[in-house]
Image (cartoon, grey):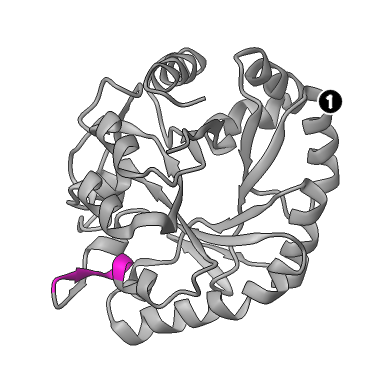
Amino acid sequence: MSTPELSIQLYTVRDALAEDTPGTLARLAESGFRNVEAFGFVGRAAELRAAFDAAGVVSPSAHAGFLTDEVRYGETVIVNPPFAQVLDEAETLGVTTLIDPMVAPDRWQGIEEIRATADRLNSYVDAAEARGIRLGYHNHSQEFIASFDGVSALEAFAALLDPRIVLEIDVYWAAIGGQDVPALLRRLGDRVRLLHMKDGILGEDPFRAADPSSVTLQQRIAGTGEVPLREVLAAAPAAEFAVVEFDTYDGDLFGAINDSAAFLREAGVR
């Protein structure tokens, strides 16, 4: 069993990046991060690549929307660019695993909708592989609301995927979705190649709430919440990257990042 490499999802430091991209990347590099996971790179990949090179970091994985034509956040609508453009920009950035970070909750409620998403993802595999890029999907908790003959929507989706496609399991969101996360990882097996090693108090699921905006996420430094992160690592022996991420954090964010990284290194992440 190999041990996963440490990385960080840059959405964690999105505000700092917006204010000072070079300084923020340098700070992460000084903390020992050599891998980062980019987001929002389409349209600025060349600029980001130059900043990554200057800081001495690489982005082996990255997030971009390509499984739906648009993404809605309340009244906000984001139109996703054509997949060919996403591939161009990912190649410029040096990405080798391209991950769609979210498909809306209504697409996980019926098997036909799930099949349509899987078919779309499968249809992109050859074009991505020709660029040396592997495709994947990252969960939240909406993929665990519906089940089919006792199988969660996420697992039904995984069963429909081309074997070249990987999963990035966000272990905090899976736990919020009611999953025994180590058991889930064992069922998914070698399909899981990346882990978002996120911890926290497991409160209400915003994707099940009547008013999602009323739900406060209580995320914590890795190893101090209710997600069994050591068991998670043991249950995902094929994982290549263990990714630090906070969607939100009430406190010293960079301190929390460093403490999370220290926990993961002590747990065997390299």
The image shows residue 87 at horizontal and vertical percentages of 74, 63
Q: Nearer the viewer, residue 179 or 76?
A: 179
The image shows residue 106 at horizontal and vertical percentages of 34, 73
Pointer 1 local density, CA inside 10 Å: few below 14, some 14–19, many at least 20 = few
Q: Is residue 30 magenta?
A: no
Tell me: residue 58, above or below residue 113. above
- Quarter of image, res 234: top left
Residue at the extreme bottom of the image, as rendered = 112
Q: Is residue 179 left or right of residue 57?
A: left
The residue that disc 1 covers is: 54
Q: Nearer the viewer, residue 104 or 29?
A: 29
- Quarter of image, res 160: bottom left
- Residue type indicated by callout 1: Ala
Magenta highlight range: 150-155
Quadrant holding the N terminus: top left
Residue at 44% across / 15% down in the picture? 262
Residue at 57% across / 29% down in the picture? 13
Tell me: residue 170, above or below residue 160. above
The image shows residue 34 at horizontal and vertical percentages of 66, 26
Q: Is residue 177 left or right of residue 126?
A: left
How many discs appear? 1
Residue at 59% across / 34% down in the picture? 14
Residue at 58% across / 74% down in the picture? 69
